[in-house]
Image (cartoon, rainbow, N blue to C red):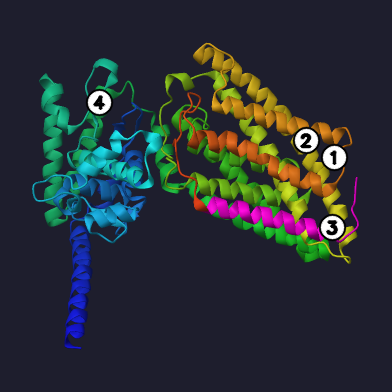
Amino acid sequence: MKINRVLIFIIYISLFSLNLFSNDIKKVVLDNRIDKEYAEQFSKLIVQSRDGRMKPLDSLNLDILNKIASKKDFFSLSYNQVILGMVYTPNIWKRVELLEIKHPRIKKSLNFEKSSVSFNDLFNEQNSYKLERETQIANSIDEKERNSFQKELIKLHEKVQISKFIYNKGFLKIYPLKDIENNRWFSPLSLKDKFVNGAKYEAQSLYVENKKFVMFALENGNWKEALKSVQMTSSFQKKYGARIIPSKSKINLELLYNDILLFEKLYSVYILLGILLFISSFRNMLSPSLLNTKLSVVLKNLIIVTFILHTINLIVRWYISSHAPWSDAYESMVFISWTILLAGIYFSKNSKYALCATTFCSGVLLFGAHLNFIDPQITNLTPNLQSLWLTIHVAIISASYGFLALSSLLGFVSILFFSLMKKNNRELLIDNIEKVNKVNELSMIIGFCLLIIGTLLGSVWANESWGRVWGWDPKESWSLVSILIYMLILHLRMSGRLKSLFTFAVITFLSYSTILMTYFGVNYFFDAIHVYASNTNTEVPIALYYFMLFIVLFIVFAYFKNKKLESVEL
């Protein structure tokens, strides 16, 4: 009994000590935080990223914190304050549990149970990386053969390397040199070797003065001189790097884009509005009322307003990046969510369920675009992607995905109506199913035509990039499969061999799986020269299997519900 009490006491003291340490490090960080105004001003300086893109440091700071911690702020500090804190007070931030770890085996190897670990926790007393051996083994294994533990090891090692790059200031490529090859800019690490004569002295002086004033400000709280040093660095950039510095309007727009992060906010709005509009429309169908009608009108107008904001933000990203905003995994998902809603708005007069279904779907797709494994940063295009044919090809293909998604969603709505069908509402629901199926068929025809045109234009781009029109690449093959599937459905429908309302609804709903395979499956589960922004060999989430089981059970339920009633044909 005494032993148990002693153990409980020891555990209590240990937990209290851990909590105390956590609170202490937070207090130390906040006591030595970078002034918010200074952080904002410093982050307006132009930096050159690894791919050569010139952008405000604000954008780079946002991307870095998102990569290493999957956060936009920490300890109530902005991402700019966090990253600059790591630059100026590295000994403090190396103790902060900032690096996200997910896999239980990694936690076990480190004897760590929390979801984040500090930089110092990953190194032993000899300053050797604790997971070096396991990481080397993971890197030696072919990418296709790596398990989830090995993938997470490599991701964690990447976070450590990024952190090192911050602590040694190697990422701060904010110093230009006039007439340098490829317009390269340099970090404080490069000042000794790369800068010569007056420029070298001027840059070194700026760096030393800036650091001195920041250290002084951290001691006495007066950031006036530190802010002046930022202005001097900005003048230095204009003096030697004006040739490639983005325009002031572009810089300000990118800062606003980062500050708002509109796409992250839109998905919850879309999902909520889609659900509310469906409930309102369904209730109005069963028992029409002026209140439900007015509510539906208000919701439709709100959806259109959000769609306009979505459109404006896409245009802003286009202007900032200087290329069409559908060139990588994140951008294509954001753009396809836009095309899906565009299709819903286009057919909203023909079917009130088209808009609510596409609004909800757009929200889900936007949510998917902001999962941790999707990188939202704006980058420069690789040479193969700098093609007018590619821009047109992807735009038309994405538009086809939007109209075909509407077809699939309307198929789901029809199946839902079949599952809710009873004798007292049978005629009403059948009437609505017939209306939905007409829009479904028209949407499929438009999507199918766009899919063919987009695929043909894709072959023109392939010929321009690789010198061949068709090469049976996985994405090309699955595009052909999608075309053949939809061609068969439309052929059976127009020839009168696919008359059953229920069968048509099920087939149109399930046929979109070929599009999902073309887009997601190939991008994330195949090696393909066609794919530029993939995460090859990604494991299939277990939730997907449960979702597929739910779909099967849902269709079976609707089928048997339908069998009880008299079969209806067009």
Q: Which mark is residue 498?
A: 1
For disc 3, the marked residue is 563
Magenta region includes residue 559: yes
For disc 4, the marked residue is 185
Residue at far top of view: 467
Q: Secondary structure at mark 2?
A: helix
Label 4 Cα crowd, 10 Å radius (few <14 / some 14-19 / many 20+): many
The answer to whether the residues at label 3 and label 1 have Cβ atoms under 8 Å apart is: no
Q: Quadrant of residue 565?
A: bottom right
**Mark 2: which amino acid?**
Ile
The answer to whether the residues at label 2 and label 1 have Cβ atoms under 8 Å apart is: yes
Say above or below: 17 vs 201.
Answer: below
Label 3 Cα crowd, 10 Å radius (few <14 / some 14-19 / many 20+): few
As measured in the structure, the alpha-carbon distance from the residue carrying label 3 to the one carrying label 1 is 17 Å
Q: Position of residue 521 (x, y in %)?
A: 54, 37
For disc 2, the marked residue is 489
As measured in the structure, the alpha-carbon distance from the residue carrying label 3 to the one carrying label 4 is 71 Å
Q: Main secondary structure of the magenta part?
A: helix
Indicate which label's residue lies in the foreground, 3 or 1. Answer: 3
Label 1 Cα crowd, 10 Å radius (few <14 / some 14-19 / many 20+): some
- Sequence-wise, the earlier of marks 3 and 2 is 2
Indicate which label's residue lies in the foreground, 3 or 2. Answer: 3
Q: Secondary structure at mark 4?
A: strand
Residue 302 shown left or right of residue 236 in the figure: right
Indicate which label's residue lies in the foreground, 3 or 4. Answer: 3
**Mark 1: which amino acid?**
Leu
- Sequence-wise, the earlier of marks 2 and 4 is 4
- Sequence-wise, the earlier of marks 2 and 1 is 2
Q: Secondary structure at mark 3?
A: helix
